Amino acid sequence: MLVDDSGVTRALIARWLTEAGIDVAATARDGMDALSQVEMCRPDIIILDIEMPRRGGIEILPELLQRAPQSRVLMASSLTTRSAHITMEALKLGASDAVAKPSSGWAGRGTREFRGELIRKVTALGKAGPPEERPAPAEETAPAEETLSAAEEAISTVSLSDAPPPRIVVIGSSTGGPKALFELLARLPETINAPILIAQHMPPTFTSIFAEHLARMSGRPAREAEDGEPLRDGTLYVAPGGRHMEVRRCDRPFIRLSDAPPENFCRPSVNPLFRSAAAWGEEALGIVLTGMGSDGLSGARTLREARARIVVQDAATSVVWGMPGAIAREGLADEVLPLTKLGAFLAAELER
């Protein structure tokens, strides 16, 4: 189902999807129209615009998910600060992913990139199938006593290796990643003796807003990374949209941003971050969360060669088990864990 108040946008996207072999079951001109149709057409994927008359996308999202629990929702957002904030809220409420509309109208390179990304994401979400169980909306920072009980539970089910405690944590994620990261990082211990660096597939403007939301959800300092800034323990760094993020190990480790070509259609890509973190050897911990494709696989190989540990999210709790699945299938993962246990494992490791 395609929900957008612009007739031109609906016609263009419907044509692109049809040409890609994707059936458009219904179109809707606003939120009320979508709610009236969704139970009858039972779509696998709902492409949902944010700002529309007669109830916008964020306003109807909870009711839409309730009426269509089998559907996955892909938010279609403009590249504005306001839209980025609304998109983050939508991802917390249960939307699976977001795609940024071109800012220069429906012509030129931006449109081609949007079309390609849209089709890739719709295809990946379609292959993932319906959610097994609709997750609850992400909550604000969890109380400390919950963090401790979760960590204690994880210790009994996940054995800690003989490797030293992590001195750097690098995380890669894509489709479904924002909500997974909100949940993963909400249970961090009070004292963290390592920086945490995140490569989440996300466009410019969105990454700085995403960092703001991470700070609120985790209760930790979080920021969009800047070129040359030193790494600080306990701080979360988000790779800026449109740039790769790497780390340099020296007397004062720092961040290096790059405009090198995309890898696996992605910039930021997980691979450069993982490859650079291999300089920490056994003191590096790599985590790969839900995401389509196989970004992070070559970087995970480099981490493995450096004897770093790698933990990935399991298929059952992933929106799309592409990125973590590729690493698991190649035998590069030390652990394959559901998201709740993965968060508890990370908390336990950072408390060592």
Image: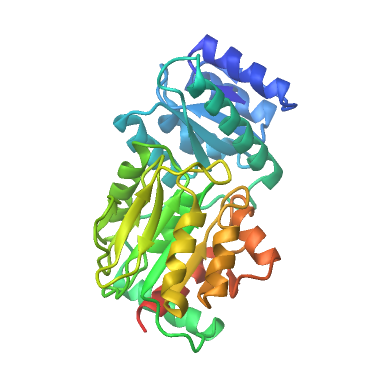
Q: Residue at x 46, y 76 (%)?
A: 281
Query: Which scheme is used to colour this image of the protein?
Result: rainbow
The answer to whether residue 121 is left or right of residue 275 is right
Q: Is residue 100 above or below residue 276?
A: above
Task: Place residue 45 in its image quadrant.
Answer: top right
Horizontal and vertical percent for residue 181?
Answer: 43, 56
The answer to whether residue 40 is left or right of residue 248 is right
Q: Nearer the viewer, residue 331 or 74?
A: 331
Q: Residue at x 52, y 48 (%)?
A: 174
Q: How many marks?
A: 0
Can residue 19 be seen here? The reply is: yes
Horizontal and vertical percent for residue 330?
Answer: 69, 66
Can residue 312 be seen here? The reply is: no
Horizontal and vertical percent for residue 278?
Answer: 47, 69
Question: For the C terminus, which image quadrant?
Answer: bottom left
Question: For the N terminus, which image quadrant?
Answer: top right
Q: Residue at x 55, y 40 (%)?
A: 66
Horizontal and vertical percent for residue 240?
Answer: 36, 45
Q: Residue at x 75, y 26 (%)?
A: 21
In the image, farthest residue toward the bottom: 162
Q: Nearer the viewer, residue 70 or 320?
A: 320
Q: Is residue 143 above or below residue 239?
A: below
Q: Nearer the viewer, residue 120 or 48?
A: 120
In the image, farthest residue toward the top: 7
The answer to whether residue 103 is left or right of residue 126 is left
The answer to whether residue 181 is left or right of residue 237 is right
